Image (tube, rainbow, N blue to C red):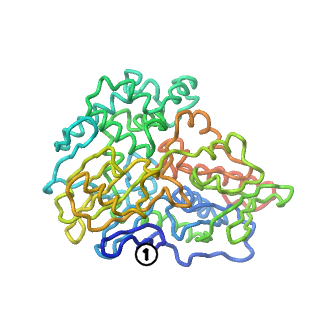
Amino acid sequence: MYRTTDGYTWTKAQGTKKGGFRCRGVIEPASKTSDGIEPYDVIVVGAGYAGLRAARDLATSNRSVLLLEARDRIGGRTYTVEGDDDGFLYEMGGTYVTHHFGYVLAELQRYKMERDLIVSHESGHANDYYTLNVEGAPRRNLSHEEAAKLTTRAWDLFVDIDGAGCRKVCPLPQSQLDNIMIPREEVEAIDKRSCLDRINEIKHLLTAEEVGVLSTVIMLVTGGKLENSSLWECIRSHALLTHSSDNFAELWTTYKLREGQSAFARRIFEEAAEFGLEWAFNTPVVSIRDDPGKTRGRVQVTTANNEVFSAHRVICTIPLNILKTIEFNPPLSAVRQEAVDLGHINFMTKIHAVVEGDGLASWNGVRSPGYIAQGYGDGVTSKGFSHIVGFGGDERENFTPEKEPEKVVAAFEAMHPMKVEKTVFHNWCTDPWANGGPAWWAPEYMSKYQDELQKRHGAIFFASGDWAHTWRASIDGALEQGSLCAIDALRELHQMDKANNRPYRL
């Protein structure tokens, strides 16, 4: 198995080490291109799930496709590494799947993986409880059932802005604007509000524990701060849970792939490669030019190595917070450029900790404030150690995990007594190809920019889970966007074939 240069690991003996993880997402050879194909039918920029889905759908439709990727691997903000010492699979970014995710389910069925799932949480180990440690309330341990009841009550009050569990204000979460059930201006009015606005509105109905837990959950979900996180995004997320917090854990934090996300992504890539996909990894893109008068009707993509590739269409899957690093010619619209310059607000922390003994494999808890605000047991390694996944909100001003491992260890130990043997993580906030986690938007961002972000720009399509219709900022949303843009590109290529009397290829 090949190794990626991404990610960090820390042990007391070795300190912090970058890269070197075994990862099924690493592709060798790193480049496979042939002379004489240009112009390609489509160049896909980015090999995350959006790019993989688009490239696969185009290649299997007998189109010439070039996939360009800045990293040495597929998967983007979702990938799996394997521990050398324990063989344990660590999900470094996106993790969870469910049969409620339509695009994910279709892909899992395609590759016969829909039943090959494992459950994240285990019960029955020594510390089978929830530790609650928030401002304004004494620290205490309670059962998982009590904690769920407390959290559910607070969350349900938070999203219930219409007295109907947000069913009135968000009946169709897949179609937020201009749907048949609620006027756009009503949605836009709600979209102006922050999560902090709503908490202040209902604080008198909540206990100190409920305020603390709710605030922590929101910061973990959004990856931002209460004052810059959109209330509407939380309401829409609740609506996607079929307007019931009973589905919160089942849809978001329960089922994982037994073989890991990178094995899933590789199946998509390998099918595309079987049908003729070409690729180049370690190949950042710096500019995309769609100037028909100067490029003979083709789109030109220039890489950091000054290579220039051309195609009839381009599907750009670069994350929202990185789009500002790409030069587009002609320039993006003023509205899209404003959206790109603002970006999203999710600057989350996710760190795996391997701790001595198996007792914490059933544990869960929150501590706020804290660099790591939540931790939960997620399996036992082959050495009998507990695997803990820790999450934090936007702590960039005071916390850089790869530079300050002592703060990481202290943050875990502050949540519950434990002896940390190893940490494994990817810092998405300092990642040059991500600059943050999956997109969460600020107040008013959706109303102002979603429509524009989903539009094409000449012969350039934009596909990213960061602006998906449905499960935004998720694997499912990325697959959705890759699929939709591939369909549009295929239709246009088909029309070009007809206009030029080329054989039918769709």
Left or right side of 278 for 474: left
Looking at this view, name the residue that lies furthest to the top.
Answer: 163
Crowd band around label 1 with a 10 angstrom C-alpha radius: few (<14), some (14–19), many (20+): some
Hey, which quadrant is residue 17 in on the image? bottom left
Any part of residue 426 in sight: yes
**Residue 151, above or below 498:** above
Q: How many marks?
A: 1
Any part of residue 105 in sight: no
Q: Which of the pair 215/113 is nearer the observer? A: 215
Left or right side of 354 for 261: right
Quarter of the figure with the N terminus: bottom left
Q: Position of residue 25 (x, y in %)?
A: 47, 69
The residue depicted at 71 percent of the width and 52 percent of the height is 492
Q: Position of residue 346 (x, y in %)?
A: 48, 47
Residue under numbered circle 1? 20
Secondary-structure class at tag 1: loop
The residue depicted at 33 percent of the width and 65 percent of the height is 423
Q: Position of residue 420 (x, y in %)?
A: 26, 64
Hey, which quadrant is residue 386 in on the image? bottom left
Q: Which of the pair 353/329 is nearer the observer? A: 353
Quarter of the figure with the C terminus: bottom right
Q: Position of residue 472 (x, y in %)?
A: 49, 45
**Residue 169, above or below 338:** above
Q: Amino acid at mark 1?
A: Gly
The residue depicted at 69 percent of the width and 72 percent of the height is 305
**Residue 242, above or below 79:** above
Left or right side of 89 for 328: right
